Image (cartoon, rainbow, N blue to C red):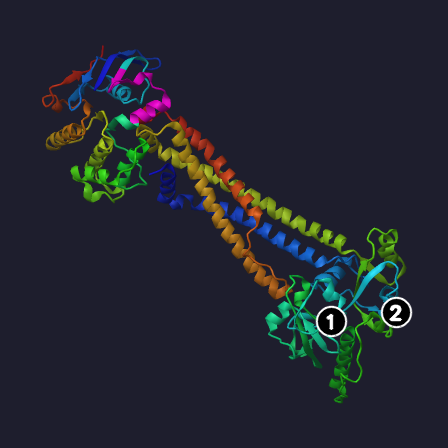
Amino acid sequence: MSILQLAWRNIIKNPLNLLMSIILFGLGVGLISFLLLFNSQLKEKFDKNLAEIDLVVGAKGSPLQMILCSMYHIDNPTGNIPIKNAAPLLRDLHPLIKKAIPLSLGDNYKSFRIVGTNHDLVELYNGKLKDGSLWSKDFEVTIGRSVADDTGLKVGDKFISSHGFNEDDDMSHDHSSFIVSGILEGTGSVLDQLILTNTATIWLVHEHEEAGAQEETSQTNVGHDHNDHSHDNSNADLLNHPDQEITSVLIQYKSRTNFQALNFGRNINENTEMQAASPAIEINRLYNMIGVGTDALRSLAILIAIVSALSIFISLFKSMRERKYELALIRVLGAGRIKVFALIILEGLILAAIGFAIGTLLSHVGMELVAKHLKADFRYSFTGWKWLSEEWMVFGVALVLGFVAAVIPAIQAAKTDINKTLSEK
Amino acid sequence: MISTNNLTYKYQGGTDIVFPDIVCEEKDILLILGTSGVGKTTLLHLLGGILSIQKGSVNIGGIEINKLSGSGLDAFRGQNIGIIFQQNHFVDALTVLENVMLAQSLAGKKADKNAAKQLLDRLNIGHKAAKNIRDLSQGEKQRVAIARALINQPKLILADEPTSALDDINCQEVLNLLHEQAKAAGSALVVVTHDTRLKDKIANRVILQTI
């Protein structure tokens, strides 16, 4: 019967006494570790999707919204921009721009967004084909890994889109039938949850939409043959349709440190109908906004942890007083003061470890539940089944709290005068 | 096995309590009689190394325990002295058997389950070994306390009022049991009591008196 076993037996003798302290402790630890899990994965997602994009140009509105929409696909567009306005960006010969990738957003299929763009987007996120080929004709689409997994679409399958982000049967575009030309391998980036096609397809869908609206009133419909004309994927082709619209342009500079590049965004904001925003700056702004919330939550978690440590202290102190004869007896049986001290400390540490285990379980299960919810709402995949090295740190802090809570009762126990205790009747 | 020399103790603000010198050989039994307040418990605690000795000396098995330091005294007590208290305390979280084995491990000895079981059997409470200590009657608890005091085969067994709560028949039985077991373990047995019934039963005795 070692001191550790004795400590353990003392704890399980009267578990109800300690239940409150342990649950409270678990709650504090759980909240802290949940925040760690959530923040680290959120940051990872955001960082992965930055993909060295220096500037996003789109319609005027909230720059953060434009970034969230164009890069993370978790918000609606600020509007569209006519190609003639964006033309200077899309020309191959622009001196500052290495890459300009047009995006046209609109419809979705089973809440996965259909994006009109060119093949550069795939390259930007290091996408590789798993099956089939990239889109080459109107209404051909290449789908990301999550899209394929969730919808079960395979190469050669056809599907019909619906309008906007929310799936709504009444808004389905009856005549826009897409065909899957290829499936991408998983990249862990936003690419996984996109359905990619050429820009012209987006325009065609919207022509249908208007035609469909007319159809409802006039009951006459002239079917649009998808194959009567085709568009190639180049930016040059877009420039042939100056009156059509796109949602935004993702831009990579040739050199980030170029003085002109630094002023490029500001020039667009001041002198054009469009707005330019830097993803890095906007995401930082977002972190700061979320940060206020997480800071408050973290303070709450720390407060809970401290209160629970206090409650462990009180239960240990109480139990030590109830057990003073027991402790004196242990001394009589040959245990030195250090052993009695260690016994109470071990009890504190065991309580903290149990609290940590409960909290960790809570946070990981909670994270997994939140992940399911996020996946359903935003198509972003988070997971609760991931262990962070920071959690070891939380474990360390938990043990320190357990020690601190136990140290005063332990000193008291070690100092007890056994002669006096045993003489009391 | 145990002898004292000029043992004197003084509580703070009190007068000196002078104890007569005592001697008890191994397998022998010594009765220390006295009315309440003459310092019986004080003497017991001095002999048991629970109270530190101010003046005089206590020799147990050739070792002067007044010369031992704090942790050395703790270890010596665990290994060489078995104490049976008037009110026996146990570790409530443990079973009967575990309470006996705790005495082994706290004395720094290997926990020997078989030895503990055999001893409980000898004391006729082997069938309660797996029971929680809280579920035993007072009489049964006293037997467990005796087992615990004996398990390490100590040089000295101290018993504080072991019979005062018992009727005549049980009084005799417990005394016999204690003496038998002490002999079997080769220990010296010192019984401290005010129970005058024991006077006629034990020849070797010391009577404490207030001076």
Task: Give the camera-side residue of A136 and A222.
Answer: A136
> Which quadrant holds residue A272?
bottom right
- At 26% across and 26% down in the image, what residue appears? B80
For mark 2, give the secondary structure.
helix
Q: Is residue A227 left or right of residue B137?
A: right
For the residue carrying disc 2, how many other residues have a C-alpha within 10 Å: few (<14), some (14-19), or many (20+)?
some
Mark 1 or mark 2: whose residue is earlier in sequence: 2
Task: Give the camera-side residue of A58 and B165.
Answer: A58
Is B70 included in the stretch rendered in magenta? yes
From the top left corner, tell me how far across and down residue A76 is, in percent.
73, 65
- At 68% across and 76% down in the image, what residue appears? A181
**Above or below, comparing residue B66 to residue A374 in the picture:** above
> Which quadrant holds residue B73?
top left
Q: Which residues are magenta?
A: B58-77
- Labelled disc at residue A263: none
Label 1 to label 2: alpha-carbon separation? 20 Å
Residue type beneath disc 2: Lys
**Above or below, comparing residue A185 to residue B43 in the picture:** below
Is A67 included in the stretch rendered in magenta? no
For the residue carrying disc 1, how many other residues have a C-alpha within 10 Å: few (<14), some (14-19), or many (20+)?
many
Most distant residue in the right direction = A271
From the top left corner, tell me how far across and down residue A245 is, in percent.
82, 71
Q: Is residue B44 left or right of residue A72?
A: left
Whether residue A425 is visible: no
- At 39% across and 31% down in the image, what residue appears? A339
- Labelled disc at residue A84: 2
For mark 1, give the secondary structure.
strand
Chain ID of residue with mark 2: A
Q: Residue beneath label 1, please?
A: A106
